[in-house]
Amino acid sequence: MKILTCAILVLALGTFTGCSSFKSSSSPSRWSGQSSKSSSSPSRWSSQSSGGGSQEAEKSAYEKDVRETASEVARAGGGGYEVMRRVGPVAAEHGITDWEGDPVTWRAIGAGLAQGGLSVTEFEQVSRDLAAGSEVRSKLLLEGYSSPPAP
């Protein structure tokens, strides 16, 4: 019942605020235009031209910050709504505009949930809320949860 109430609240807030947190967007993230070649890869980072060492460092810093944020939420007993609420500002700090459509975000969230100590059952509940019916997001969250980086 608590999850259903949270889901309704999140959907209502999204409707009133114009939030697109639960919609996959095709608008580019900060790094999508880094290469002169177009790429059909789903990763925002893979379309970069070579020699983007600082971009790779930025990607790594973003991933780390998202992972730590998700971990903090998990340790505090927060759910999917709280993760979504806290990841948006982290993405903004890194100049990421399409964080909801970025696979790096979802893998980092999954890894953070594992790092935060969520059990498999708890992860399944939170990931259902986060994925909002998206098979792609579910898969990315599970990838991150199943192989979190060493602390």
Image (cartoon, rainbow, N blue to C red):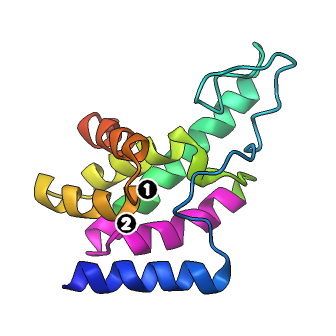
Quadrant showing the C terminus: top left
Q: Is residue 144 left or right of residue 108?
A: left
- Where is residue 80 shown, x and y percent of the image? 36, 68
Q: Can residue 117 be seen?
A: no
Query: For the point 48% across and 67% down, which residue is it?
Result: 84
- The residue sitting at 65% across, 33% down in the picture is 44
For residue 16, above or below residue 45: below
Q: Which disc number belongs to residue 72?
A: 2
Q: In front: 117, or 40?
A: 40
In reply to whether residue 78 is colored magenta, the answer given is: yes
Local secondary structure at mark 1: helix
Q: Secondary structure at mark 2?
A: helix
Q: Is residue 4 left or right of residue 48?
A: left
| Labelled disc at residue 101 | none
Q: Is residue 130 visible?
A: yes
- Of residues 26 and 147, the one drawn nearer to the viewer in this rendering: 26
- The quadrant in which residue 30 appears is top right
Mark number displayed over residue 68: 1
Characterize the local packing of mark 1: few (<14), some (14-19) or many (20 or more) Cα atoms within 10 angstroms: many
Going by the picture, which residue comes out furthest to the top? 50
- Tell me which residue sits at (74%, 22%) in the image: 48
Location of residue 22 in the rendering, given as x and y in whole percent from the top left corner:
51, 62
Question: Quick check: 19 left or right of 141?
Answer: right
Q: Which residues are magenta?
A: 73-92
The image shows residue 53, relative to residue 84, as above or below, that is: above
* Amino acid at dot 2: Glu
Would you say the residues marked 2 and 1 are in contact, meaning their CB atoms lie under 8 Å apart? yes
Q: Is residue 37 one of those drawn in magenta?
A: no
Give the image location of residue 109, x and y in percent. Answer: 41, 51
